[in-house]
Amino acid sequence: MTASSSLPPETVFDWLDTEAAKRAEAGLTRRLRPRPAQQDELDLAGNDYLGLARDKRVAGAAAAAALRWGAGSTGSRLVTGSTELHAELEHELARFCGAQAALVFSSGFAANLGAVTALSGAESAIVSDKYVHASLIEGCRLSRADVAAVAHATPDAVRHALSTRRKPRALVVTESVFSVDGDLAPIEELAGICREHGAALLIDDAHGFGVLGEGGRGAVHTAGLSAAPDVVTTLTLSKALGAQGGAVVGPRRVIRHLVETARSFIFDTALAPASAAAALTALSVLKSEPGLPEKATNHAVDLSMQLKAAGLHTTLPEAAVTSVRAPSPEAAVSWAEACAEHGIRVACFRPPSVPDGVSRLRLTARADLTESDVERAVKVIAETAPPGATA
Ligand SMILES: Cc1ncc(COP(=O)(O)O)c(C=O)c1O
């Protein structure tokens, strides 16, 4: 058959079934599981680290904003989509993080895409940790830069890639807390290496913001880098803040550049006012209850230690994420299903979401868990563990 030969229309998408069959064969089928508004399941799969998504103050602020400003933002940020709420949120985010300025995007994914592409380009090299989130990887792919994906959390590999680059400018890209195992990037060392080599550092603090550091100011603040002239932080408003949306926080001239050049900012309808109001209120809750983050991180450590004591391969969490190794993708799926049948919702991570190809259950802790929640979860996860999951 030649490339131009015609196909009956009903067969044009036959290749999708072939691909789906291959995924099923490899145990990689993905299915949506819509959840009801009220459920009895104990949630260790979401990212609502501080339990704010259903907080009445936060959800109430979203409802009030929808009534006042409308259900949608009506346009892109440069046209009609910027409300006073967006401006206030940006001001508060920058102040909370100790940075010069912030810019709100419609999601953390869009913030990463926009920041990576706008801060690189054909004249730039990008050196990225090879375990970074898909949104950063897509930014690298779209950037037209020379991209080197280097060994995970290995400063020497970053130094080598920077010193052998062919492009004058360079951007180093990492997560602070890696989203699969919950381990921490060597941020301070990376910042030092960037300075030796005249490179900018972009840190995705999606899992650190609201969880780590003084009052939840995040990993970049803890490293003393939030006001640095050469460091840019990306955030999501959809995890610890329990809302929706993303942000870039950093030097004022970086933010100005993003407003004028980041395509995922310019050509995207602005974040809905309800989400902006929810994030603003969640931020003020966090300021008034600065002990919340530590509750989440303590529960994550308890989960991890107790699972380890039960003989499972867990990671020691640096923030509120931990993971448990599964022997295969199929075993991970049935393990997660068995947990769900016993009322514990855990996330199942399989390739391509796991960069090292090892399937895992990913567990996220929340500030509003109780000790008995943790004990119940450990009991169910340990009792439903498949053969090969124990050490
Ligand atoms: C590390 C990391 N960065 C970025 C994102 C994207 O954020 P959002 O869900 O707000 O698009 C996520 C979300 O899963 C994430 O885990």
Image (spheres, rainbow, N blue to C red):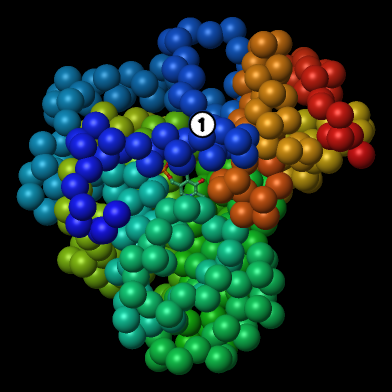
* 130 to 391, vertically: above or below: below
| Horizontal and vertical percent position of residue 131 | 59, 59
Which residue: 62% across, 54% down?
Answer: 355
Which residue: 25% across, 58% down?
Answer: 3
Residue 289 in sight: no
Amino acid type of the residue that numbered disc 1 sits on in the rendered structure: Arg
Residue 26 in sight: yes
| Horizontal and vertical percent position of residue 357 | 67, 50
Question: What residue sits right under mark 1 in the picture?
Answer: 30
Q: Quadrant of the C terminus?
A: top right
Kindly tell me whether mark 1's CB lies below 8 Å from ligand 1.
no
Nearest the camera: 237 or 157?
A: 157
| Horizontal and vertical percent position of residue 19 | 46, 41
* 166 to 362, vertically: above or below: below
* 224 to 239, vertically: above or below: below
Which residue: 39% across, 48% down?
Answer: 108
| Horizontal and vertical percent position of residue 64 | 24, 20
- Tag 1: Cα neighbours inside 10 Å, few (<14), some, or many (≥20)? few
Nearest the camera: 164 or 208?
A: 164
Nearest the camera: 92 or 264?
A: 264
The picture quadrant where one finds residue 118 is bottom left
* Farthest front residue in view: 1
Nearest the camera: 53 or 98?
A: 53
The picture quadrant where one finds residue 368 is top right
Q: Quadrant of the N terminus?
A: bottom left
- Helix, strand or loop under label 1: loop
Which residue: 54% across, 58% down?
Answer: 132
* Farthest left residue in view: 79
* 351 to 141, vertically: above or below: above
Q: Is residue 391 left or right of residue 105?
A: right
